[in-house]
Amino acid sequence: MTTTDASADSSAYETARENRIPPLWLLALITFSGTLAMHIFVPVLPIAGEALHAGAAEMQATISIYILGLAAGQLVYGPLSDRYGRRPILMAGLVVYTLASLTALFSSSVEMLIVARLFQALGGGTGLVIGRAIVRDTSTTTESTRRLALMNLMVTVGPGLAPIAGSLLAGVAGWRAIFVVLCLLGICNILCSWRLLPETSRMAKDQSFSLIARNYGLLLRTPAFVGYAIGGSCATTSFYAFVGAAPFIFVNQLHRPTGEIGIFLGIVVLGYWLGSLIASRLAGRIPIRRLLAFNLLSLLAALFLLTISATGNLTLIAVVGGMFVYTIGAGIASPAAMSEAIGVNPLVAGSASGLYGFVQMVIGAIATAATGLGSDHALLASLAVVIACIISQICFRIASRPA
């Protein structure tokens, strides 16, 4: 093939890519569905536990198992979407998500609910991986940062309002109504994706197990990817430590009614929304890597929370306000870290997206589990996010070094 022919093929591909960019709202819908199912269920953990005769540890397992399910699913879906295309893998995952939501609706024991939640997460993980990969397929690095920030903006509206919606649904129709809503959301995702989602990847002919392993090995040997993946994950999903501990912090330590948990969590998660809005405005105006410095804002907020927790000066305003500032910083830094990590090797964007998501959820699961190591949930949660923010800063410095 001549240089002219190669240039023509590249130009034709770019033109075709521009013509098949899916709507951003659809990518946001399929992406936030996976994490929505986690956030919307958190406020009703005590209520569902009473109904299923389960203790706090068993109900917290429905969250930690869900996070691990998201991690495992993303590790698999990334390379599969590189080989078979984004569209068919996404559709399969959405079907699993919907059927698992239906199973959770009719769960008669906490064990059945945990298994249903695992498969719900395995299905929901497709949207997290493939939504990001599609953005990277159809955008330049600067464009992808802006689009990921805008998508993150829309995505965080859902989880931001999810705890409130979960509390309201449980109050009006019982905790099982949450799974009715998730099942309907799954059906909506299937129909919209079937009609509106085009194929965006250049599928690799060879995607054997050995090649998948080599791709992951290549990414894990790339300091930039490892730094951005671990740094970005610590800056964002360490927040799950607070999410898992929130019902016990607000009810047991701050003595607030169960019905208010969703409102406070909603306020905190909306900090991500504000941070993503800021990131979308700054992307393209300042170097992408400078957005990572906003993780320092999260670190300062986390140190404040650790201080008031350790000194016994917890107040509702301090906890909610401190975590709100924390999530603003995370909302700004997250799209930049994600874009840089996925863009390390565009030929394996799906694998990079899946591995990035896997790292995110593993760190989230570790942070969540850490809050169950003692009775002082506020102290443990704040300590977890402080350590995570420090690790983020170290990793970002390593990733930003010239190769």
Image (spheres, rainbow, N blue to C red):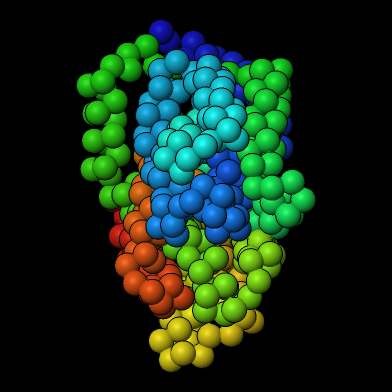
Q: In percent of the image, x 63 and y 19: which residue is there?
A: 198
User: In this picture, is 188 found above or below 146?
Assistant: above
Q: Position of residue 53 (x, y in %)?
A: 48, 51
User: In this picture, is 60 found above or below 259?
Assistant: above
Q: In percent of the image, x 40 and y 77: which residue is there?
A: 376
| In this picture, residue 214 sits left or right of residue 262 | left
* Displayed quadrant of residue 259: bottom right
Please name whichever residue, 14 or 27, is drawn nearer the observer in this view of the structure: 27
Query: Given the current orientation, which residue lies at the most extreme right position?
Result: 172
- Tell me the quadrant of the picture where the N terminus can be found: top left
Q: Position of residue 181 (x, y in %)?
A: 69, 38
| In this picture, residue 56 sits left or right of residue 190 | left
User: In this picture, is 141 found above or below 196?
Assistant: below
Please name whichever residue, 195 or 39, is drawn nearer the observer in this view of the structure: 39
* Displayed quadrant of residue 29: top right
Please name whichever residue, 306 or 41, is drawn nearer the observer in this view of the structure: 41
Q: In percent of the image, x 54 and y 55: which residue is there?
A: 50
